[in-house]
Amino acid sequence: MNYRSTRGAPAVSLDTALVRGIADDGGLFLPVGLPQFTGDDFDRAESLQDVASVLLQPLFIGSSLADDLQQIIDETFAFPISVSELQARESNCGVLELFHGPTAAFKDVGARFLAACLSRLEGDTENPLTILVATSGDTGGAVAAAFDGRSGMRVAVLYPDGRVSDRQAHQLTCWSDNVLSLAVNGSFDDCQRMVKAAMADPALTKKHRFSSANSINIGRLLPQSIYYAFTALSHWRRNGRKASFIVPTGNLGNAFACYLARGMGLPIGEIVMATNANRIIVDFLDGEEWAPRSSVPTLATAMDVGNPSNMERLRAHGGEAASLAGQVRGVSVSDEEISAEICRSFEEFGVACCPHTATAIHVWRNFDKTERLEKDWILVATAHAAKFEQIVEPLIGKSIDIPDELAQILSRERRFTNIDATVTALENALAIGFSENAAA
Ligand SMILES: *Cc1c(COP(=O)(O)O)cnc(C)c1O
């Protein structure tokens, strides 16, 4: 299987797409022709891992990783992914819990899969690959956790000092010697600018072998299709009906993975994207022209995206607004509605949900009765509420139990370096940080 650019550059192998992250023409990679599956193909696939093997096998044909695929899958899905039920008065619905990984959010899946692939392709103990990641909170933790302790690989995480939550800061700064945590005296935009500038500097790039673990990397997207495939198949086997999903959406990686799973023939009905007040996707499907916006801050911070990158993939695959509007839906949820939903879900279902998950629950709740009953809805829970306790606890008036994985991370010692928001400061920190770490 080869991978084409959304902008038309010649297709490349999976290995190249994984290592480059972005195509030469600035486009995003997509498989050339999606494999098509029927139910029979999954006859012997019982577990999440089994489904992953069937689904990924054709996507890995011709890759040097093909023989390692089972191992890569096992390393990625080493934590449970399960569906729980919301017991509502009129109709029940499922909740796909994607928050049982090491950093308690769904980004663990993509980050771990990409780490497993890249370390096999590019790991080099003599001359390690350095993953540079700028983060506003969630991504950096998942990437650091995924690459932690992998030999031949290093990670430098840049985050805006004082602008991430305490628990997020902990997840960014408690790792082994191959992870360098940099608290930047500046904003997230500064962090991003520094990473871009460093990667555009030929001398620096050569010295450190920079690479990125962006959410646009196809290696983060593909494994996310697996939990949709597995959940939809399990539902189909039990009920003989298609599952419809409501997906909290920011950069559109998670929802697009669901779209890919449906495109490969899995029994998925509707796909509804729940956004926060950053409603560019909703307006686009309504017929407005696509014009990138600045993001507005909301309670669901990980979805504060004004220019969702994966829309380029969705449009390349599904056509323009009129055509897309027949395939997916979008609904925007305000901060007031998020707060109210967190309270109401707790009262009604006894479930503490994170602000991102609350957008999906709210969209489902606002459907009219026919719509709720007609389809089998599965809401996607993208993070554990304990990660956003500063928002959720005051609303529900109760402290949230910390899941074991998160507790383990929070018990580790933190280690980080403060730096100014300049490329020179980053350059120095890399030179000192990794040699010190290596000597430690
Ligand atoms: C990243 C993130 C999202 C948004 O996912 P996209 O793939 O960017 O649409 C939603 N919820 C949580 C908790 C996240 O970390």
Image: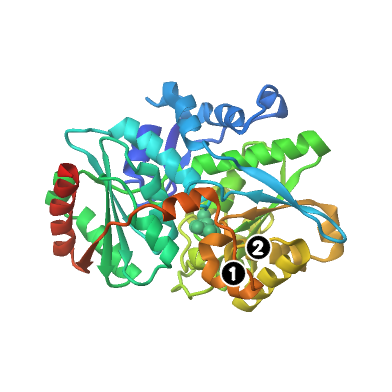
Q: Are marks 1 and 2 in contact (CB under 8 Å)?
A: yes
The answer to whether residue 160 shows anywhere in this view is yes
Q: Residue at x 55, y 47 (%)?
A: 317
Q: Amino acid at mark 1?
A: Val
Where is mark 2, residue-wise?
352
| Residue 360, x across and y down, in percent | 66, 61
Total residue callouts: 2
> Residue drawn 71% across and 36% down?
233
Q: Which residue is mark 1?
A: 392
Q: Quadrant of residue 413?
A: bottom left
Location of residue 96 in the rendering, given as x and y in whole percent from the top left corner:
66, 49
Residue drawn at x 67%, y 26% as measured from the top left: 42
Using a 10 Å C-alpha cutoff, classify the residue at mark 2 as few (fewer than 14 neighbours), some (14 to 19) or many (20 or more).
Answer: many
Q: Is mark 2 within 8 Å of ligand 1?
A: no
- Residue 178 lies in quadrant: top left
**Residue 61 sits above or below residue 127 on the image:** above
Q: Amino acid at mark 2?
A: Ala
The color scheme shown is: rainbow
**Image quarter hosting the C terminus:** top left
Q: Please report whichever mark, 1 or 2, sits nearer to the chain's N-terminal start.
A: 2
Tell me: is circle 1 under 8 Å from ligand 1.
Answer: no
Can you give x and y, in whole percent of width and height, for residue 352 in the image?
65, 63
Q: Is residue 206 left or right of residue 186?
A: left
Dot 1 crowding, Cα within 10 Å, few <14, some 14–19, many 20+: many
